[in-house]
Image (tube, helix red, strand yellow):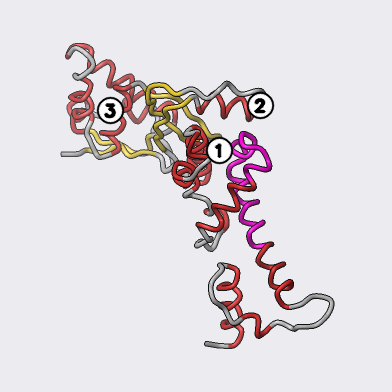
């Protein structure tokens, strides 16, 4: 291994807390001994990763407060060294970490806040795509509707939340006093980006099922079949058309194609 590459490798191993020969390459002279010189780099590495978590999870930071968030960050960094070339993607596992590790696991809403914030970041950073319009829908041959398949915007995400996570997130974002954590029935949320702006809303049970089927390649006919679990047969076509129209108006449908 070339000398420079070896030095980089050894320093990386040291920063990650692994056995390293980097100390042999560091000048041992006043005013700082080798251990303190290396300690500066190792501490700076950890602090930068914790700062990155704060950038991605500002509401969680606000909910926990500076001291507890710093403690969370130190634990997380120790358990999850960065494996990405871009620091933007650091912290993807934070919600799962919060679910498993006390004292944070004692308040499940912490994990849900983290999951919401990470998902919103993914939505904002997702690729763009041209969207289908109402005119495109009107151009579909009526005989072809039953086999119509949909393709969705790359930013589209669905998230299930059991706690009053969204009201807490909104209150903290406005620097208002958040409501006390409260657990209720699981609710599916739809998240997407339109015109460079993130959006999200809750989904009814029938819309969540219909959307899940469409995302998996189900046809408009399949959506109608699924909706019969909630509605009389004569009400299904109107509901299915209404859902599709709403998805198009929201800018989450990017293609229409004929399926089987």
SS at circle 3 = helix
Magenta stretch bounds: 44-69
Q: Are the residues tagged 2 and 3 within 8 Å (C-beta)?
A: no
Q: How many marks?
A: 3
As drawn, the label of residue 18 is none
Residue 43, image x, y percentages: 68, 62
Tag nearer the camera, 1 or 2 = 2
Residue 31, image x, y percentages: 84, 76
**Which badge, 1 or 3, comes first in the chain's sequence?**
1
In the image: residue 237, left or right of residue 35: left
Residue tagged 1: 196
Residue 259, image x, y percentages: 19, 39
Q: Residue 243 appears in which quarter of the rendering?
A: top left
In the image: residue 61, left or right of residue 102: right
Identify the residue at image location x=45%, y=41%: 99
SS at circle 2 = loop
Principal SS element in the magenta part?
helix
As drawn, the label of residue 210 is 3
Identify the residue at image location x=62%, y=51%: 52
Residue tagged 2: 174
Is residue 245 visible from the viewing direction of this image? yes
| Neighbourhood count class around disc 2 (C-alpha, 10 Å): few under 14, some 14–19, many 20 upward | few
Cα separation, mark 2 vs mark 3, equals 34 Å
Residue 221 lies, with reference to residue 127, above or below; the image says above
């Amino acid at each position: 291994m070339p000398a420079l590459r070896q030095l980089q490798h050894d320093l990386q191993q040291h920063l990650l807390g692994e056995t390293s020969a980097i100390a042999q390459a560091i000048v041992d002279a006043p005013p700082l001994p080798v251990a303190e010189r290396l300690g500066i780099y190792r501490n700076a590495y950890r602090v930068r990763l914790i700062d990155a978590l704060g950038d991605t999870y500002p509401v969680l930071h606000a909910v926990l407060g500076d001291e507890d968030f710093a403690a969370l960050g130190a634990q997380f960094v120790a358990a999850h060294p960065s494996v990405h070339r871009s620091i933007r993607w650091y912290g993807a596992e934070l919600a799962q970490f919060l679910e498993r590790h006390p004292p944070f696991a004692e308040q499940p809403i912490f994990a849900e806040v983290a999951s919401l914030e990470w998902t919103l970041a993914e939505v904002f950073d997702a690729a763009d795509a041209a969207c289908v319009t109402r005119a495109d829908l009107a151009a579909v041959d009526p005989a072809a509707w039953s086999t119509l398949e949909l393709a969705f915007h790359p930013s589209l995400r669905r998230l299930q939340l059991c706690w009053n996570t969204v009201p807490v997130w909104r209150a903290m974002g406005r620097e208002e006093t958040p409501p006390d954590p409260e657990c209720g029935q699981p609710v599916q949320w739809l998240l997407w980006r339109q015109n460079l702006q993130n959006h999200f809303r809750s989904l009814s049970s029938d819309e969540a099922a219909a959307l899940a089927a469409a995302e998996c390649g189900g046809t408009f006919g399949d959506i109608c079949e699924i909706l019969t679990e909630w509605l009389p047969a004569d009400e299904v076509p109107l509901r299915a058309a209404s859902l599709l129209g709403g998805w198009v108006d929201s800018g989450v449908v990017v293609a229409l194609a004929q399926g089987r």
